[in-house]
């Protein structure tokens, strides 16, 4: 065998991984552009990018202008000039096209990206801290708690349409309650993967049963609304929901990245991780709290989209490997692509009928997952 | 110089006492072999020394109680090689060895970290496995990789739990002579639990015998291994040979039934 350095192989692999990440990011940008072109009113791809760019620049200048206006007293003369030149004459690029792209299609596309990224990320973290390939945000009862919260608001509240924020708030609230319950139960016996999974499954069944009970006593319209909520849909996305989910993603992602090395070490077991100086329980608690929050911030708006959190991490692990420093951003990208792709197809394949994205993700993701799973014979988990 | 001082260490799983007032010390740069029958508390003792478990009593490293040390500080000083068998999901061999650098490195591994990991792999002769998936290796290869990880950690004290458990005789010899060489070359202090008395006698400077959580004997292999003691601790009749080349050889003859023991 010829002289080959183990270190060089590792460095080469790192470069490969960064390349894959870059490629995924580019694909997302391209696919989101294509996704905006889709719909009953056809728009060309260059037009889409141009319109978005124009409108984004306009919005940016308006925001900047308003900020400057707010502090005009402290501005030097140049700032004043800027205001005069740039705001007075600028007309908002408003037309039908802008409305369709900016107000209707873009929020939905952005929500698909953020929701997919969040759910994938939450799944990757859960699988890491629980050292279990079957873990997903849903293992720990998070989704069933959200469903129960939403159902409760729908069945006992004033109906679906009029109480949107009640449904969202309730779903979010119950998710946090479920996480706290899992944490409390696991804490009692020591925070190990086994105790957390056991507690999570118990909580999951409890909330599913309570949701079933609500469906049993609810009126048929309520039940219909509950089922529709549980199917998962991006149709309720607005700039407001996009912003809220995005904020949570922007807060939790850096925390997860900071934990990446610890998550890597955790794969070798609690003892080894402890011995290597990793505060195992702390990492597990932060990871669980972050993943719960991330999931809650998405599914309270979208309803349950289950499959991404389980499968996006696996797909990414098979492509990019298990190093969480690459796995985490990679999973976010894969999750975003999966959800965006699924929603785009779901919107067009039976147009004008829109298929719920929860169903489409499974239809699209499962074959891809099985393909990777069969092709890759390595005993990777 | 005393490197590790274990003072009256006691540990119970729930109400079941596993270690009872164990006191001993290990000199810097020496190899201590822990021997004793199954369930005598060897693994528990090793975990207590690394503070994976928190026992009653104290463990001192260079005179400082490890209870007062930060977790990261302990990790810089004590390396631990667990028994093999646990899988490590989606990790290449190089990544597993790099885990050993965790206490030293930041988020991004430096060239030095990479070089040290590579050197550790060369030391164990596993550098050609670097790109393979850890889970695909044989038990013996995994064992060596785990030792390489501990070597990459550059600890002052190395704890090994049955490092030859899953190895055939050739790999047993290899692994133990590597550990022996490491200790002699770098002055590292080694504490290892070993099943085989002959192997323990050959590679350890001192032996310590545990039985049901109690320390029954401590001394050089020649002092410690006697047919009477093996009968008393293991309940086995044995013969001991001394060979010029092979050193002390223990050959078990037969188990004594409980009644006569």
Image (cartoon, grey):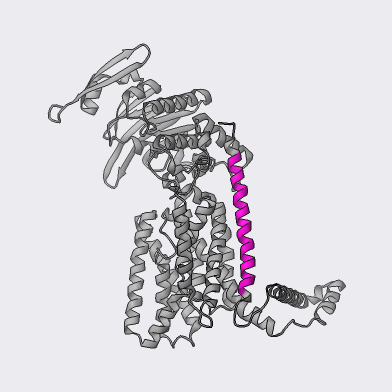
Determine the residue positioned at 47% across, 36% down: B145
Residue B165 located left or right of residue B104: left
Is residue B70 shown to the viewer in this render?
no
Quadrant of the image occupied by residue B10: top left
Span shown in magenta: A8-35
When the figure is inspected, residue A353 is found, relative to residue B21, above or below; the finding is below
Residue A112 located left or right of residue B179: right
Is residue B143 shown to the viewer in this render?
yes
Q: Position of residue B261 (x, y in %)?
A: 16, 27
When the figure is inspected, residue A191 is found, relative to residue B244, above or below; the finding is below
Determine the residue positioned at 33% across, 34% down: B42
Q: Position of residue A62 (x, y in %)?
A: 74, 77
Please state which of residues A254 and A355 is positioned toward the viewer in this rendering.
A355
Determine the residue positioned at 64% across, 71% down: A33
- Magenta includes A70? no
- Magenta includes A10? yes
């Amino acid at each position: 065998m010829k002289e080959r350095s183990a270190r060089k192989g590792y460095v080469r692999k790192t470069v490969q991984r960064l390349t894959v990440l870059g490629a995924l990011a580019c694909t997302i940008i391209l696919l989101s552009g294509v996704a905006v072109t889709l719909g009953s009113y056809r728009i060309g791809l260059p037009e889409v990018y141009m319109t978005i760019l124009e409108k984004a620049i306009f919005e940016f200048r308006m925001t900047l202008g308003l900020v400057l206006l707010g502090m005009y007293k402290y501005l030097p003369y140049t700032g004043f000039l800027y205001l005069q030149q740039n705001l007075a004459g600028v007309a908002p690029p408003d037309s039908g096209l802008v409305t369709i792209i900016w107000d209707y299609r873009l929020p939905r596309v952005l929500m698909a990206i953020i929701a997919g990224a969040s759910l994938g990320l939450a799944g990757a973290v859960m699988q890491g801290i629980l050292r279990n390939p079957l873990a997903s945000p849903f293992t720990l009862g998070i989704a069933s708690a959200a469903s129960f919260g939403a159902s409760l608001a729908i069945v006992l509240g004033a109906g679906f349409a009029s109480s949107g924020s009640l449904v969202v708030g309730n779903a979010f609230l119950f998710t946090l309650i479920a996480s706290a319950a899992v944490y409390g139960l696991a804490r009692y016996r020591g925070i190990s993967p086994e105790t957390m999974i056991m507690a999570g499954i118990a909580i999951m069944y409890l909330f599913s049963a309570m949701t079933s009970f609500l469906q049993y006593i609810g009126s048929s319209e309520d039940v219909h609304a509950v089922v529709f909520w549980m199917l998962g849909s991006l149709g309720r996305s607005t700039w407001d929901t996009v912003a809220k989910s995005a904020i949570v993603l922007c807060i939790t992602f850096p925390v997860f990245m900071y934990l990446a090395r610890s998550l890597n070490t955790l794969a070798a077991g609690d003892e080894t991780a402890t011995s290597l100086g990793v505060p195992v329980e702390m990492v597990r608690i932060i990871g669980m709290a972050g993943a719960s929050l991330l999931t809650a911030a998405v599914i309270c708006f979208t309803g349950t989209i289950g499959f991404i959190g389980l499968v996006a991490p696996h797909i990414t692990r098979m492509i990019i490997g298990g190093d969480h420093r690459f796995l985490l951003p990679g999973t976010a990208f894969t999750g975003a692509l999966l959800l965006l792709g699924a929603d785009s197809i779901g919107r067009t394949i039976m147009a004008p009928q829109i298929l719920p994205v929860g169903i489409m993700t499974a239809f699209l993701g499962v074959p891809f997952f099985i393909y990777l799973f069969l092709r890759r014979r390595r005993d990777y988990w | 110089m005393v490197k590790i001082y274990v003072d009256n260490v006691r540990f119970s799983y729930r109400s079941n006492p596993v270690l009872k007032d164990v006191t001993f010390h290990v000199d810097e740069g020496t190899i201590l072999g822990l021997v004793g029958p199954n369930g005598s508390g060897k693994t528990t003792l090793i975990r207590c020394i690394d503070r994976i478990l928190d026992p009653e009593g104290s463990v001192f490293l260079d005179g400082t109680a490890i209870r007062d040390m930060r977790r990261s500080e302990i990790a810089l000083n004590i390396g631990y090689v667990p028994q093999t068998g646990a899988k490590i999901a989606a990790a290449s061999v190089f990544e597993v060895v790099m885990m050993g650098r965790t206490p030293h490195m930041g988020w991004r591994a430096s060239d030095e970290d990479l070089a040290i990991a590579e050197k550790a792999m060369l030391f164990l002769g596993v550098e050609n496995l670097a790109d393979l998936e850890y889970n695909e290796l044989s038990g013996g290869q995994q064992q060596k990789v785990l030792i390489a990880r501990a070597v990459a950690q550059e600890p002052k004290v190395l704890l090994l739990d049955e490092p030859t458990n899953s190895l055939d005789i050739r790999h047993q010899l290899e692994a133990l002579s590597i550990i022996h060489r490491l200790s002699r070359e770098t002055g590292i202090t080694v504490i290892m639990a070993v099943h085989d008395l002959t192997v323990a006698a050959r590679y350890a400077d001192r032996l310590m015998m545990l039985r049901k959580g109690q320390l029954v004997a401590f001394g050089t292999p020649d002092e410690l291994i006697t047919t009477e003691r093996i009968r008393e601790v293991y309940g086995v009749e044995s013969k001991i040979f001394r060979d010029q080349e092979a050193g002390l050889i223990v050959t078990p003859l037969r188990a004594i039934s409980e009644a006569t023991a």
